[in-house]
Image: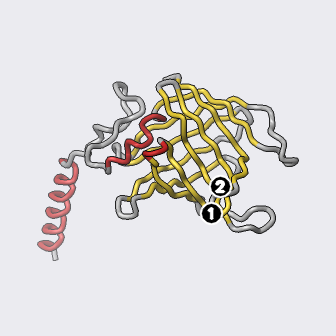
């Protein structure tokens, strides 16, 4: 019995020493030199789709009120960075109204789609809502969809679009669309100017 305990102890010490000797590659994580991280060369090339947004922006957010009128614009910051050692993208919004939010964005090469999981301070959801979509090169925009019925029960999607990318910023719009995307009803729009 003593021999067995000694053998187990020796094996455990050897295993933990080999685990301690392993290096964890964090070279693409946010750092002093790269505060928003870097895309990992081992990641699908699409991880660079969000490159125009990486960094910090000052934005104006405008949404529709309960009477469908556009509310007064509010200030917000929107920060994007590479996470999981450059294999995915995370964003965070901080808004003047105190309702903050963020998303984890992962690209799946098998489906050729982005999957975006959204969370907010307005409530901790047991399951995060998810959008899916892709970068549309021909229109130079990123489009994401989530099934959602209109208030009248009509089938459709809530569609998110990043567009109008430039060195100084980008635009975003959230809108309800029908299944054929012939009807579009915008409910939220954001304009962003790069500051970092």
Q: Taking 169 as reference, is 1 above or below it? A: below
Q: Tag 1, which secondary structure?
A: loop
Query: Residue 169: image x %, image y %?
Result: 53, 28
Is 54 situated above or below 113? above
Tell me if 61 is positioned left or right of 114 in this view.
right
Quadrant in which the N terminus appears = bottom left
Would you name the residue on which mark 2 appears? 124
Q: In the rendered structure, which disc, 2 or 1, sits on the residue that comes first in sequence?
A: 2
Q: Badge 1, how many Cα within 10 Å: few under 14, some, many 20+?
A: few
Q: Is residue 48 left or right of residue 116?
A: left
Q: Nearer the viewer, mark 2 or mark 1?
A: 1
Residue ID for mark 1: 180
Judge by depth and name the residue closer to the eye, 56 or 19: 56
Q: Nearer the viewer, residue 60 or 175?
A: 175
Is residue 183 toward the left or the right of residue 145 in the image? right
Image quarter of residue 30:
top left
| Residue at screen point 14% across, 62% down | 10
Q: How far from the left and from the top, in percent, is residue 154?
A: 74, 67
Q: In which image quadrant can residue 25 be found?
A: top left
Q: Position of residue 60 (x, y in %)?
A: 67, 30
The residue carrying pointer 2 sits among few (fewer than 14), some (14 to 19) or many (20 or more) residues within 10 Å by Cα, namely few
Q: Tell me the residue at 40%/63% (across/down).
A: 111
Between 190 and 98, the one lying in front of the other is: 190
Looking at the image, which residue sits at the far bottom? 1
Point 59% across, 63% down: residue: 127
- Name the side, left or right, on which 36 lies relative to 180: left
- Using the numbered discs, state the Cα–Cα distance from disc 2 to disc 1 in whole angstroms: 32 Å
Task: Point out residue 69 in the picture as x, y percentages from the top left corner.
Answer: 84, 42
Q: Which mark is residue 76?
A: none
Residue 32 against residue 62 in the figure, above or below: above
């Amino acid at each position: 019995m003593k021999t067995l305990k000694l053998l187990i102890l020796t094996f455990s010490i050897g295993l933990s020493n080999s685990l301690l000797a392993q290096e964890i590659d964090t070279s693409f994580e946010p750092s002093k030199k790269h505060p928003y991280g870097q895309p990992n060369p081992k990641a699908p090339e699409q991880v660079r789709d969000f490159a125009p947004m990486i960094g910090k922006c000052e934005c104006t957010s405008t949404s529709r009120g309960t009477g469908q009128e556009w509310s007064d614009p509010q200030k917000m910051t929107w920060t994007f960075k590479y996470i999981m050692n450059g294999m995915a993208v995370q964003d965070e919004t901080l808004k003047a109204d105190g309702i903050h939010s963020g998303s984890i964005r992962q690209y799946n090469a098998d489906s050729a789609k982005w999957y975006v999981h959204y969370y907010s301070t307005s409530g901790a959801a047991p399951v995060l809502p998810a959008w899916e979509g892709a970068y549309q090169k021909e229109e130079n925009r990123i489009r994401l969809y989530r099934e959602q019925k209109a208030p009248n029960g009509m089938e459709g999607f809530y569609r998110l679009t990043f567009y109008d990318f430039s060195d100084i910023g980008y635009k975003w719009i959230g809108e309800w669309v029908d299944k054929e995307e012939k009807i579009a009803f915008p409910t939220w729009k954001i304009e962003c100017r790069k500051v970092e």
